[in-house]
Amino acid sequence: MTYLLICIGSGVLGALIALRKGSSPYVWFVVSAVIPVLGPIAAVLYRRETEVPLRRCTTCGAPTRIYDAMCMRCGADLSYPEEAEIIEPTPLMRVRARL
């Protein structure tokens, strides 16, 4: 019974950390509940989705992450950007993770 409470508490903690970082709280709840101690630590060390460098789509101009191969807004194929095309994200250009 104690182990089950530790797993649920760890899962909730991992989900809260993921929610603050812009990741999926459901995925991190499962990861943190299955691996009680290491799950929340992995959620803390995982990258923050809102701090990933961006670039603009060449077709519609929407901000996309630099590692996206396709624009989520218009569907245009994107190649890896040149160094001059990479922009640092601002709160106005926040791109949320779509899972």
Image (tube, grey):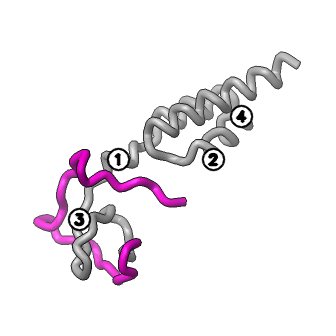
Among the two numbered marks 3 and 4 on one chain, the one whose residue lies closer to the N terminus:
4
Rounded to the nearest angstrom, the CA distance separating label 4 from label 1 is 25 Å
Which residue is the site of mark 2? 27
Is the magenta region chiefly helix, strand or loop?
Answer: loop
Rounded to the nearest angstrom, the CA distance separating label 2 from label 4 is 10 Å
Helix, strand or loop for disc 4: helix
Residue 9 location in percent, x, y? 69, 24
Q: Which mark is residue 50?
A: 1
Quadrant of the snapshot with the C terminus: bottom right
Q: Residue furthest right?
A: 1
Assess whether mark 1 and mark 2 are in contact (beta carbons under 8 angstroms): no
Among the two numbered marks 3 and 1 on one chain, the one whose residue lies closer to the N terminus:
1
Rounded to the nearest angstrom, the CA distance separating label 2 from label 3 is 27 Å
Which residue is the site of mark 3? 55
Query: What is the magenta range?
Result: 72-99
Q: Is residue 91 above or below residue 6?
A: below
Residue 37 location in percent, x, y? 65, 26
Rounded to the nearest angstrom, the CA distance separating label 3 from label 1 is 13 Å
